[in-house]
Amino acid sequence: MTTSTNAPTGPGAPAPPVPPGPNGEAGSVLHIDLKAVYYGKFKAVRDSALDVKKGTITAFIGPSGCGKSTVLRSINRMNDLVRGFRFEGKIRFRGRDVYESAVDPVAVRRYIGMVFQQPNPFAMSIFNNVAFGLRLNGYKGNLNERVEQALRSAALWDEVKDKLRQSGLALSGGQQQRLCIARAVATEPEVLLMDEPCSALDPIATVKIEELMQDLKKKHTIVIVTHNLQQAKRVADTTSFFYVDTTQGGRTGYLVETGPTKELFSNPREPHTRDYVAGAFS
Ligand SMILES: Nc1ncnc2c1ncn2[C@@H]1O[C@H](COP(=O)(O)OP(=O)(O)O)[C@@H](O)[C@H]1O
Ligand SMILES: [Mg+2]
């Protein structure tokens, strides 16, 4: 997918004017106040609000089709690229609504990067994959240093330092996903969105990414979608449970509750959450 990078898509021109705003609600990097999201006439998500605190990992959990990816992709305006997509509400990034008319969605993605379910390195060398967004941004510093730093941040440097000119596509699945993480963090986004980043990976590669996330959160605020409840328990400080009640013929998802991960799993407030975390359905 050509849109799968957090990097801006324009020429290496000067950065367009955008967020971040000065400061958000105390300690909050993101404040999501979603009223509705539509794909054409279909209302995919309704009434969902949450705050994301700086330096934390927030997990979105819930059954398939409840809108986790839709909400995640709304945060950095990735869904703008989908025909018929319409967002109602506000998403404040450090106090500024990313849906304000003056805001360039491409620039939003520079501050709020993304990693996808399927590792999707570009068909180019490892080095160029990581340098991609930096070049587009017209980065003037030492490219070699910055690429190394990003690969170190993604816990990949030691494995690839002697083959930076080889194709990113020649790496294993787990390495490819860490390359995508390196590519995403190279431009130093404040927020990193991850949509089921481990679901295509084996258990060992999954553990590596989970460990890596604990390092990444020192520099980046992370929001991750996962269908794996154990993963949410292992990595997330905060967990948000989404649900879609299809029994009445409805298909509109919504955020049921958000809480500290331990509490949400051990003492959920809402019956739907209780059923879900008890493994009643998946
Ligand atoms: N690009 C799209 N066009 C139309 N409908 C979509 C699109 N993406 C998702 N949907 C629908 O929106 C709802 C929420 O989907 P999604 O956000 O992918 O859920 P989840 O990630 O929780 O599985 C589903 O009913 C899905 O079919
Ligand atoms: Mg999804």
Image (cartoon, rainbow, N blue to C red):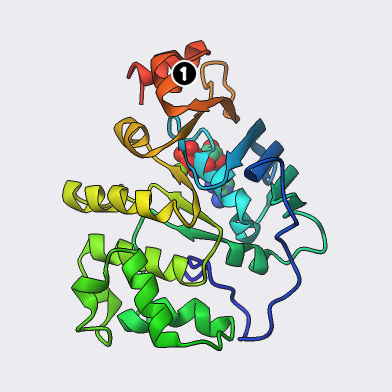
Residue at the spot of label 1: 273
Compare residues 120 and 1 and report the one nearer the observer: 120
Q: Residue at x 49, y 68 (%)?
A: 5
Q: Position of residue 282 (x, y in %)?
A: 36, 26
134 left or right, relative to 229? right
For residue 173, above or below residue 246: below
Compare residues 60 and 253 and report the one nearer the observer: 60
SS of the residue under disc 1: helix
For residue 255, above or below residue 160: above
Q: Residue at x 55, y 84 (%)?
A: 139
Q: Residue at x 80, y 56 (%)?
A: 100
Callout 1 environment at 10 Å: few (<14), some (14 to 19), or many (20+)? many
In which quarter of the view is residue 146 placed? bottom left
Q: Is residue 124 visible?
A: no
Compare residues 211 and 205 and report the one nearer the observer: 211
Q: Position of residue 17 (x, y in %)?
A: 76, 71
For residue 168, above or below residue 58: below
25 left or right, relative to 82? right
Q: Residue at x 74, y 49 (%)?
A: 95
Q: Position of residue 97 (x, y in %)?
A: 76, 51
91 left or right, relative to 177? right
Q: Position of residue 175 (x, y in %)?
A: 25, 65
167 left or right, relative to 133? left
Look at label 1 and name its amino acid. Answer: Thr
Residue furthest right in the image: 101
Q: Is residue 8 visible?
A: yes
Label 1 residue near ligand 1, CB within 8 Å: no
Quadrant in which the N terminus is drawn: bottom left
Q: How many marks?
A: 1
